[in-house]
Amino acid sequence: MKGMIFAAGIGSRLRPFTDHHPKALAQVGGKPMLRRVIEKFTAAGVLDIVVNVHHFPDQIKEFLWASDYFGANITISDESETLLDTGGGLLKARPWLDGDEPILVHNADILTDFSISDMETAHKRSGAAATLLAFRRESSRQLYFDADGSLRGWQNLKTSELKPSGFCPEADFERLAFGGVHIVEPRLFPLLEDYSASAGAVFSIIPFYLATLAKERYKAFAPKADFAWHDIGTPEKLAAAEAMLKNRS
């Protein structure tokens, strides 16, 4: 597999840290989150990695250089001029990610310890165009999967908005929240190009998945073993991740 780490986000909810630093360099347990995700990639044998940057991009570039790129082949996808969101960011990185290998995509602000190899195995067996880490947790945005584990729709619980158009959740659908990690097949790049032509250069990956359900299959992956998962996007959530690591030590 190749890999992409989304490290471009502004992280406004993590102020005051992000007033002077990129969110990806916020530390948990004495390690910047970007380092934790890169080490997770390399431990899984993912050595060709793209990291996108936007907010304080030079700090991330200098961090990677000073760390000798953690022994991996790391390429910077520079979004300094325009933050492209997850879908647009993945599409911009196409020159480095296209080919025959699936792509492990991971948000830099997600701390989790599930098995990447288990997810890769499930992805290969399913033949899906993308496999999403999805599990039960409190979130206002929920994905719906059918009995086969295939994505069927999305709902904003606060507004009751449903996607795609005409989607109506069925009783046997399972409602899960996206965990910020997915494995994507390169065959999606032409569809991403087509979607971008109408949606614009800046777009999120989840609306893209929902808009292309008639053309490709997207599957859920929920780890069988217990695993930790933390979004460190706010000071409170960052503190919770710190507490989890301390309890484990």
Image (cartoon, helix red, strand yellow):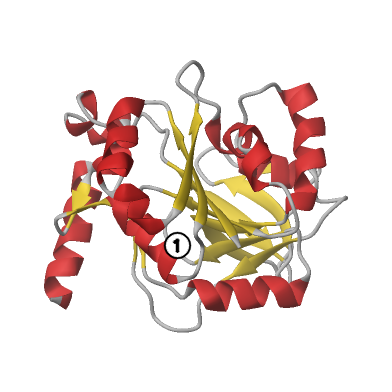
* Residue 216: quarter of image: bottom right
Q: Position of residue 214 (x, y in %)?
A: 87, 50
Question: How many marks overall?
Answer: 1
As displayed, is residue 147 above or below residue 50?
below
Residue drawn at the location 76% of the way across and 64% of the way down: 128
Q: Where is residue 161 in the image (x, y as percent from the top left)?
A: 63, 39
Q: Position of residue 204 (x, y in %)?
A: 60, 36
Residue drawn at the location 50% of the way across and 83% of the way down: 224
Quadrant position of the N terminus in the picture: bottom right
Q: Where is residue 248 in the image (x, y as percent from the top left)?
A: 17, 76
Horizontally, residue 236 falls left or right of residue 135, namely: left
- Residue with the mark numbered 1: 41
Quadrant position of the C terminus in the picture: bottom left
Name the amino acid type tagged 1: Phe
Horizontally, residue 173 falls left or right of residue 15, namely: right
Q: Which of 46 and 176 is in front in this view?
A: 46
Farthest residue to the bottom: give it. 225
Residue drawn at the location 35% of the way across and 48% of the way down: 109
* Residue 9: quarter of image: top left
Q: Nearer the viewer, residue 38 or 218?
A: 38
Horizontally, residue 154 falls left or right of residue 18, namely: right
Secondary structure of the residue carrying numbered label 1: helix
As displayed, is residue 113 above or below residue 53?
below
Horizontally, residue 78 falls left or right of residue 165, namely: left
